[in-house]
Image: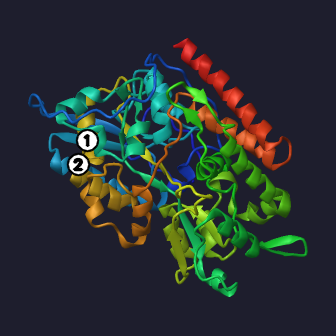
Amino acid sequence: MTEKKQHDALPQSFALTSSPVSRGTMLRGAAGLGAGILGAGTALGQAGAAEPRIEVATPARAASGNIQVWYPYSGTTVQAFLKLFPLFQKSNPGITTTPTYAANDLSSNQKLFASVAAGAPPDVTWVDGPEVSGWGFRGIIQPLDSYMKRDGISLGDFWAPCAKEIQYGGKVWALPYTADPNFGFYWNKKLFSAAGIKQAPTTFDEMNAIAQELTIVKGGNIQQIGLLPWNVYGVANSIITWGWVFGGNFFNQTTNTVTADDPPIVAALEWMVSYAKKYDITKISAFTTPFGQGPNFQNGQVFALGKMAMQPMGPWEIPAIAQYNPSMQYGITRLPAYKSLAPSSWVGGWCVGIPKGAKNPDAAWEFVKWICASNAGTTAAGNAVLDFPGYKKSSFFTNIPANIKAFYPILQGTQHQRPVTPAEDYYMGSLNNNVSDALYGKKTPKQALSDCSKDVQSYLNGVLKKH
């Protein structure tokens, strides 16, 4: 969940653009542009275990001055988001903020890397959760452990998958801002009822059967699709979602071993390929092309228009459904469970960190702490962007907006986060390419995932060796 723009190396105050960027388009995976710039970071190792809370030992000096804050929001959410800055300044009167739009994804984060290399970074930056370890490893962002220790902030204050992805090499590199419950399973009650189906599927086999029943092909062309297995915000995110549903494991954190060819993941891809063969993926592509491709595919719009009967989607699709079909009758539940396994879900979302070389890191920390680890900040932010805070102690959870309440149980049951490794971006790119090859019949599922594992392992070994 994107139009991408390059920006000048130095920020300008309130440099907003008109390109709409939703959290949906920000889900990484399909772009996969490799490792980016290797910086001077030297931290090695795996994600550490949560430490116990350590209370404040000495009073902190009052931070003050101006901070440059780079954020990724634009489009319909940006005006509500920008209202957070005066709220922060009201509770921190000695600090002023200069918020600046800066696209932050695999094709545009070079702007931030260049600013760090030039010694002119912002004081605060948003960073996608699975990229935190890589940015810390490369010296793009700086560790926050001393601030956390001083202010009594514990990793246990955050949702467990969020806490895991902010650690690498025994250090914490950012704090979780949002916790996306990936995913809710949306189903169109009208289409189900017309087919005599009264409720959402609870098992994978039920889902698979209903998906085929609700797929309509006329004159060789698809008129309505039951489910789009590889359109869960890009091919890479799709295989990650279904691979976990099937009980797979993509990475061994203890040994730094890439395991894309884990047998349950191979089985998940075999299922996806069978769907591609049965309905001809080229015809499905012709059906979906008007609504975008890859991570830019407009899932919410297609679902609202009644062209897709069910699909894993995030809470950010709710406004699109309201826009395209205000009276639509639909439900949101957990992803159907595979065989005897529990329903699967994973956490995505943004984090906030302090770039290496920030001119005012103390004031920057006060902002990071307020927006990521305070009741006032996380509640205001959650309501502004209509998403769950990564801070599980937030008072936001005592009064969740009605239209996203269905996602709260999904968030509570999340088990996974994307691999915590400095090769995560490269991994997503390799998954995208190899899984696409399997879907289009260029490789068998097993060969595609074996090639991915070997490719990413070789790259990761090289990165670790250099440092």
| Residue at the spot 62% in from the left edge and 58% down from the top edge | 339
Going from N to C along the chain, the mark reached first, 2 or 1, is: 1
Position in image of residue 122 (x %, y %): 37, 33
Inspect the image, locate mark 1, and give the three-letter code of the amino acid beneath it: Lys
Secondary structure of the residue carrying tag 1 is helix
Would you identify the image quadrant in which residue 155 lies? top left
Q: Which mark is residue 369?
A: 1
Position in image of residue 57 (x %, y %): 11, 28
Position in image of residue 257 (x %, y %): 59, 27
Position in image of residue 190 (x %, y %): 62, 84
Residue 96, visible in the rendered structure:
yes
Residue 20, visible in the rendered structure:
no
Q: Which mark is residue 209?
A: none
Secondary structure of the residue carrying tag 2 is loop
| Residue at the spot 41% in from the left edge and 62% down from the top edge | 409
Q: Are marks 2 and 1 in contact (CB under 8 Å)?
A: yes
Q: State whether residue 98 is above or below residue 114.
A: below
Q: Which mark is residue 374?
A: 2
